[in-house]
Image (cartoon, helix red, strand yellow):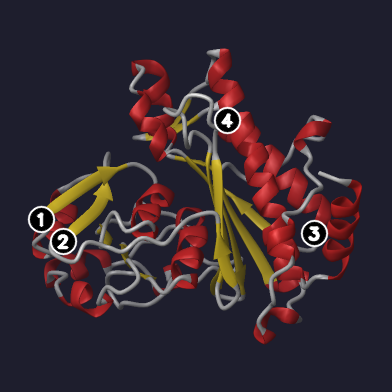
Amino acid sequence: MSPNITLTSLKMASTSPLILRVVATSVVVANRAGEIIRDIMSKGDLGIVEKGKNDLQTEADRSAQCSIIASLSSQFPGVKIIGEEGDSVSSDVPSDWNVTDSDPSVLALKCPDNLKSVKEDELVIWVDPLDGTSEYTQAWISKVTSLLDHVTVLIGVAVGNKAVGGVIHQPYYNYLKEGAPLGRTIWGIIGCGWGGFTIGSAPKDRRVITTTRSHLDATVQSALDAMTPDEVLRVGGAGHKVMLLLEGKANAYVFASGGCKKWDTCAPEAILHAIGGKLTDMVQGESYHYHAEVEHRNSRGVLATAPGEDHSWYFSRIPESVRQLLSGSSTSSR
């Protein structure tokens, strides 16, 4: 990067609205987290810890989160950051993990009036440092490299209750293309813009639904059957599933379970809404809340649809028995 571009970026970073600065920094931070994830796998010791049934944590999860939280908290000390692996950050984070740069293309955006004056204490950042940990570990243990497509880094930005900005990084994007640069980062801000990908057109002559790869049960299957899909894509990671909607590879994402968390959906929801798609719960058809005190679990399931899809049709197909099972949780989980 030339000195002139660097000086311009620094000036923009100091004068741009806070929401743009947070997302612009998160783009670069997510790139660095992706490098950390790849480096740890290449060294051959993932440091796997079992947190619970079908819930693994690796050294990549821990290290990527340390980098993300250290970078964002140093630049935005008044912003609440909630990470999947807890909110503690080691004091000896390597200096090259602490990112200070920002993406100039995000800083150059025109910020909508409703977000121009947002202050740090109004923001909550939700971080999943490695979405698709199960697929990440299986790719390493079983050498099934196709599972690397499922791995993402998620950084979501909420203002009050609402997810408004998001960043999704794919560390292994282009891994099959010899000589191509590894990884890509996509982002979106509602009412502002999006970048890093091309919006696809969802299938018109068939219904393709994406759902969980590793948490399938009778309730999830009942909801899927009610949608009468022509094809079901069972993949890992909420970030990866929503990316299938963004790029037109699926019409809807259906997950009739309370297994998803706020750090799984905040970033994908914001990007999806920025391009005209929709993500809600499966009980009341409402967007989830993302304020700092909300329950972390998305206990009412997840229903997301690609741009141009009739979200209300999918919602109307959800069996009453599924709604009843999912509605047992308190409204604080919204």
Q: Quadrant of residue 325?
A: bottom left
Where residue 100 sits in the image (x, y, percent)? Answer: 81, 47
Q: To which residue does mark 4 refer? A: 37
Query: Disc 2 vs disc 1: Cβ atoms closer than 8 Å?
Result: yes
The residue under the point 44% across, 55% down is 261
Q: Amino acid at mark 1?
A: Asp
Q: Amino acid at mark 4?
A: Ile
Q: Which mark is first along the chain, 4 or 3? A: 4
The residues tagged by marks 1 and 3 sit, at their Cα atoms, a distance apart of 46 Å
Q: To which residue does mark 1 refer? A: 230
Q: Secondary structure at mark 3?
A: loop
Q: Is residue 29 above or below residue 187?
A: above
Q: Is residue 121 shown to the viewer in this render? A: yes
Where residue 259 sits in the image (x, y, percent)? Answer: 35, 51
Q: Nearer the viewer, residue 43 or 54?
A: 43
Query: Disc 3 vs disc 4: Cβ atoms closer than 8 Å?
Result: no
The residue under the point 57% across, 30% down is 37
Query: Disc 3 vs disc 2: Cβ atoms closer than 8 Å?
Result: no
Q: Which mark is first along the chain, 3 or 1? A: 3
